[in-house]
Amino acid sequence: MRPDPVPLSRAQRLALTAASFLLLATAAMALGPLIAGSGWWWLCAFIAGGVLFAGTGLRALRTPASLVPVLELVVLLLLLTLVFGGATSIALVIPTQGTFEAFGALMSGAQRTIEQQSVPAIPVPPLLFALALGMGLLAFVVDLLVQTLRVPALAAVPALVPVVVPGFIIEAGADAPALVLTAAAYLLLLRVDVRVRRRALLAAGADGDDAATIVPPNRVPIVSTLGASLGLAAVGLLTASILAASTPSISSSLLLGSPSQGTLFGRGVSPFIDLGRDLRRPEASPAFHYFAPDADRPYFTLLTLDEFEGEVWGAGNAAVDGDNTVDAMPKPEGLSDAVATAEHPIEVVVDEVRTTWLPVPYPTTRIEGLSGSWFWDEGSLSVRSVDTNTSGQRYRATRLEVEPTVAQLREASTDVPADLEGHLALPEEMPPIIAETAATVTAGAASRYDAAVAIQSFLRSAQFDYSTEAPVAEGYDGGGFDVIATFLETKAGYCVHFASTMAVLAREIGIPSRISLGYTQGSPTQERVDGVQRVEVDSHDLHAWPELYFEGVGWVPFEPTPGRGTVPGYSRPGAGDGTGAAPPSTAPVTPDASGRPELDPDRGLAGQAGGSATAAGWQRGVPVALVVVFVLLLPALLRIGQRWSRRRRIARGERPADAAWDEVIATARDLGAGGDAAETARAFANAVAERAAFADAAARSALFELRDAVERERYGPDIATTAAAPALLVDLANVRAALVADAPPAVRARALLAPRSLFDAARRRAFGERPSLGA
């Protein structure tokens, strides 16, 4: 690292560090809409402050400049070890091999929670680790730019990272207050740097015997001193706004028929919050349609959730196995040969749903006709792609219909295979109402099967209401344990709450459980092809349901949500009476063949129709266009402000001739008509007077009048007066008009949109150059 050409004192270094910390702390606030609570912000502030102020301390101890960045990274490692290392570290801060293994597990968990959670995300430890690491690295980059390389203007680049991120995830982007505060903090950093640099230059000049020191004026026009800083801050802020407005967000998941292709939370499936958000939209968008015999109406699974990340249901993190091709899929786990099965082919045509997870019935034995690479996951048999999505796919799936008897379910072994013990996992501390409800509802159940039927009957009873609005109105939307406890008290919710509650109650009594996300049967149409019926599935049919494991039968679906889907025959109360055979499982619970809640207009999961998408495009495009136009006109606006400031100085008699001459020089620079900083006023006037436009006597006379006035003011007695202001303003107008008339139209346009004088002034301030008094 090169040494700073102008050494800074400890106090000056500390001021720059404080301003840098404020910039990062305010920029981090822009992530607020994405993450629940505020604890994560304090952690980020702690990590950023530790790295930045550690650098200041190292410099105060006269550590070699080349070692400071390296030691800052060491400090970041120690801080991460202190917060996340736990028992794997030595003395809480010294990492060991186990610490790095823990960090690797946290990073894997962070990727998983980012993929699975919806916004606002619950700050589970893996997500907190990723935030802390990212903020620490941003702090390192900011310190490198501000303190080591001494280019604080570039600190806007790392500061923009947390500001821009919300624009990729939610339509609203970062909150306006966070953007304004970040811009203000950036301006403050630039201002502190100007002050620090100026004092350092003066101090350096005072130390030398032969150095000439120029004392800056006590009062300088605001437009002149802050123009460059304001311009940089405005450009940075507007750039962030453009990116936030123009980048595709994933506030509507790809699962729900959104045209967006980029996704962060949920791999295209935002399991709970986004599902509820879309349930409250009145319009539907087509998902897919399929052809099947009249009695063949399966559920279609996209994704299976079987693990907890804190309080959040998530999918397993098993890597894709390249050998698990869908042309031959395995027998579902736990299914014995004693259970009757039958294969049924179904042809599926995808309409608008776009996701990397394929809608298929569980279980499916093989899939044909897909384009791209598709693989099945162990256990869940979910099908996903690594290089394409469902858009435009047409495929033939052979599903395996499993027909267990009630006796087989009731007599299933209570032993849980070792590889399924994770499907019983629950946190040590849960709201007491969960265990109390499980014990009360299943009291007297003769078997685990009877207990499962009792839980389903309890949730489908008249005590509970299907409602998409109540969870939002009362603040318990989602699928966490606190949400389940509130749901059991309020007894109102939608499929997410019913499914997650039954899955947790089942685990509480020892039955392995998981949650499937996908679609119900859809709505039959009048179209028939070769003896099979066409069934339409749209975003209204999105659904969540629990699956429970019974040894010898495997994973068995239940339907606890009232008014939704179809209750399997084997799970109906009294199904085991008499012969013990399960009634047919195809009869719907409600008259509505689509399985949608009766008299519930807000049940649907609406995608955007073409008209609304067009309107959204206009709503997004117009602000972006306006912002682009404003950015293009920003230099012109700043130049107009500068000209107005100089005219005010002339009118007030504050060195009026100097102000008028500065405007003449700036106009000449903008138009490429001279105005070199090393050129004297007289030399400039003589050169410009030779131009064709100054053949006019009035323009030539005005030019020389201004030249004489500025020479008298600069080198004569200092006499403040406003008497000459009107004449100076007239002369200035004549000279500017002549300069503009002498320039071609293209040059005039360039001078208006990209004034060279403004950029030269910004460059001088950025690099600490002093303007010459020659011209």
Image (spheres, grey):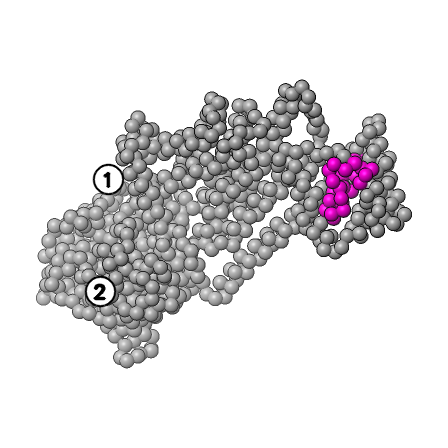
Quadrant housing residue 275: bottom left
The disc label shown at residue 96, or none: none
Amino acid under disc 1 = Glu
Answer left or right for 464 relative to 261: left
Query: Where does the magenta region start and end?
Result: 656-684
| 687 magenta-colored | no
Q: Is residue 315 visible?
A: yes
| Residue identifier under label 2 | 328
Amino acid under disc 2 = Ala
Residue 456 drawn at (x, y percent): 22, 56
Q: Residue at x 27, y 35 (%)?
A: 98
Q: Residue at x 39, y 59 (%)?
A: 254
Q: CA distance from mark 2 to mark 1?
A: 40 Å
Most foreground residue, 254 or 205: 205
Label 1 Cα crowd, 10 Å radius (few <14 / some 14-19 / many 20+): few
Instruction: Judge whether 207 appears above or below 548 on screen.
Output: above
Q: Is residue 46 visible?
A: no
Q: Secondary structure at mark 2?
A: loop
Q: Residue at x 52, y 53 (%)?
A: 245
Q: Secondary structure at mark 1?
A: loop
Residue 173 drawn at (x, y percent): 49, 49
Residue 596 drawn at (x, y percent): 33, 64
| Residue identifier under label 1 | 428
